Amino acid sequence: MSAAPDRRTPVAVLGATGAVGQSFIRLLEGHPWFRLAEVAASERSAGKAYGEAARWVGNSDMPADIRAMTVRACDPSDVTSGIVFSALDSSVAGEAEAAFARAGRMVLSNAKNFRMDDDVPLVIPEVNADHLALLDMQRKNRGWTGAIITNANCASIMAVMPLAPLHAAFGINRLFIATMQAVSGAGYPGVPSLDILGNVVPYIKDEEPKIETEIQKMLGRRVNGRIEPATMVISAHANRVPVENGHTVCLSIGFERRVSAADALEVLRAWRGDPAAHGLPSSPERALVVTDLPDRPQPRRDVDAGRGMTVTVGRVRDDALFDVKMVAMGHNTIRGAAGASVLNAELLVASDRMTGA
Ligand code: NAP
């Protein structure tokens, strides 16, 4: 008896050899809707077997079927899948992702290049699934038959999870954010060990402005087909810390009216996110979990919550300077990168937005 045909949609990963690329490979293994059909990377890797080109990191083994795949060039003439996940370095993502969108592919990007463009959705399905409507403008403006959908910088995603319900309930007008970002956020090989072991580096190139503007865009409202960014004032400090996986963000939040920690906790506990994100294959049972433990969240203990897709928030307390302060933490290469893109692709499929309106 022959095996049943695999009816899953073939997908490709660009930048498949890097830290986020490997996270894609792990998440796509056994995916119910998508089948990883092609992997692509730089000309250093193209033409080699994936097992030879990639230095596999992380605790699970490299999937056997991926090991033998030939790495392709990041060019739409070499990669044929209709859905393309991009974990490309930003130095090359701009040109490569545009070429794929022009060639009719749906590109789910982790890179910063297009995130802040007016006609490019910057999406977390639980928070702003309606921003996908920007795709109509993108197709009209650019004449592409495909499209680019982005997910935010990994630290911004951790922050936006608790901020979204609080902004909807009370209106945030001031935000102070200090991040403690894991070394895997810098890719592979990333930060030299002698710079980070036993140390904290209070600088991540370009990170602070990205955090400030991306949060405003994701919390923005759709008005006349465009996104009106949230007007809150944001001050971000970004730090690299010697943690393997898991970005922690400390948030002090000011609201348009007086809000207590008890008010904030009630809203955070009740929040389930946009129903459009419920029941998708990568949706966690809870996108945001509140912990009452006095010393949590911690990367070591909480980073794998919801298979890396849950953000844990804790230490919610009154703040003498603003109104409320808290700590949020989540997995930077899953919820903050590859898992975010896979969830966005599932949302696209489920909301019938794979092709133009
Ligand atoms: P990485 O480990 O440095 O991997 C970069 C990937 O890009 C590799 O597969 C590399 O292929 C490929 N590449 C480099 N130059 C290329 C070229 N000229 N042509 C084609 N491919 C090229 O970086 P990463 O941490 O995975 O990050 C990937 C992207 O995701 C970046 O834009 C980053 O900012 C973003 N991001 C990362 C995180 C995170 O937590 N790490 C979170 C959110 C967003 P070779 O192996 O062949 O060189």
Image (tube, rainbow, N blue to C red):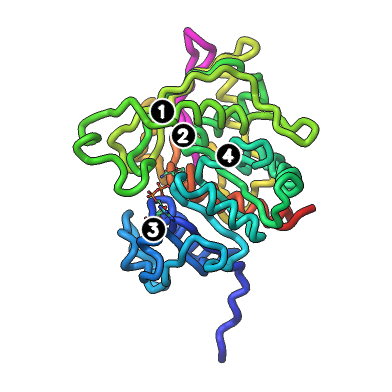
Q: Amino acid at mark 1?
A: Thr
Under circle 3, the secondary element is loop
Give the number of the disc on residue 179: 1
Q: Comparing marks 1 and 3, which lies closer to the viewer?
A: 3
Relative depth, front residue between 163 and 224: 224
Q: Which residue is located at x 40 percent, y 42 percent?
A: 303
Q: Which residues make up the magenta segment?
A: 309-328
* Label 3 or label 4, whichever comes before in sequence order: 3
* Label 1 or label 3, whichever comes before in sequence order: 3
* Label 1 or label 2, whichever comes before in sequence order: 2
Residue 2 found in image quarter: bottom right
Q: Give above or below for 116 relative to 62.
A: above
Q: Comparing marks 2 and 4, which lies closer to the viewer?
A: 4
Q: Give above or below for 269 relative to 9.
A: above
Q: Is residue 195 magenta?
A: no
Give the number of the disc on residue 115: 4
The answer to whether marks 1 and 4 mark residues whose Cβ atoms lie closer than 8 Å is no
Q: Position of residue 213 (x, y in %)?
A: 56, 28
Relative depth, front residue between 302 and 69: 69
Give the number of the disc on residue 155: 2
Q: Is ligand 1 closer than 8 angstroms to the Cβ of mark 3?
A: yes
Q: Amino acid at mark 4?
A: Arg
Q: Residue furthest toward the bottom?
A: 1
Q: Position of residue 24 (x, y in %)?
A: 47, 56
Q: Position of residue 113 (x, y in %)?
A: 53, 41
Mark pair 3, 4: CA separation: 23 Å
